[in-house]
Amino acid sequence: MRSEDTPFVGGPLDGRVLPVLTGLTGQPPKWYDVPVPDAAGGPPIVHAYRRVPAGFTRRLGVQRGWRYEYAPEGRGSEGPHWPWTRRPHPRRPPASEAGGPDTPAR
C-alpha cells in the first residue's frame, strides 16, 4: 500500500505531518478519525479531521496535495441526498398541544 505524508491543521495533531494510507485512486480518505483514550478509563474521545486541498500552483492552478483540518463539530451528514428519500425531521407536538386551529377557544 502507498502512503502520503499529510499535514494536520488544528486540534490535537496541529502541525504534525503523518503518513496516511491512500486508496485505489491515490487519494487519502475524506475523513480521518483520531481516537484519544480517556484518562479515567472511559470510552475514547474521537477527533475528526476533514480532507481539504493543501493549495494550488500559481501558474496552472494544479492542486498541490491534501491536508487535514480539524472539524470540532465532528462528521456531518455525508453522501448524496436523493429526492425520493426523507431526512429525519424533529418531532412536532400534536396540533392540540401546540395551540393550533383544532384547539377549542376558552
Image (spheres, grey):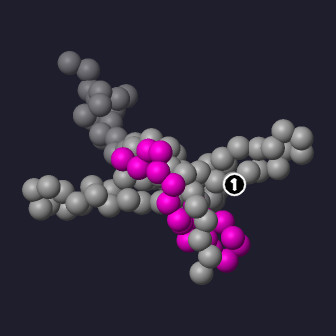
Specify the farthest residue to the right: 60
Query: Could you tell me if residue 50 is visible in this image?
Result: no
Residue 45 location (% of width, % of height): 27, 55
Compared with residue 72, is residue 101 higher up or lower down, i.e. above or below?
A: above
Q: Is residue 26 magenta?
A: yes
Compared with residue 28, is residue 70 higher up or lower down, i.e. above or below?
A: above
Kind of residue at disc 1: Gly
Q: Residue at x 57, y 57 (%)?
A: 6
Majority secondary structure in the magenta region: loop
Left or right of 67 on screen, residue 10: left
Residue 104 is drawn in which quadrant?
top left
Residue 68 location (% of width, % of height): 54, 51
Residue 72 location (% of width, % of height): 40, 42
Q: Mark 1 sits on what residue?
A: 65
Q: Residue at x 26, y 20 (%)?
A: 105
In this view, the residue in front, 2 or 82, is 2
Compared with residue 102, is residue 11 higher up or lower down, i.e. above or below?
A: below
In this view, the residue in front, 90 or 18, is 18
Compared with residue 53, is residue 84 higher up or lower down, i.e. above or below?
A: below
* Crowding at mark 1 (Cα within 10 Å: few <14, some 14-19, many 20+): some
Where the N terminus falls, by quadrant? bottom right
Q: Is residue 4 magenta?
A: no
Left or right of 55 on screen, residue 86: left
Where the C terminus falls, by quadrant? top left
Q: Magenta residues?
A: 12-30
Query: Could you tell me if residue 41 is visible in this image?
Result: yes
Specify the farthest residue to the top: 106
In this view, the residue in front, 86 or 96, is 86
Q: Residue at x 64, y 54 (%)?
A: 66
Residue 2 location (% of width, % of height): 62, 76
Q: Secondary structure at mark 1?
A: loop
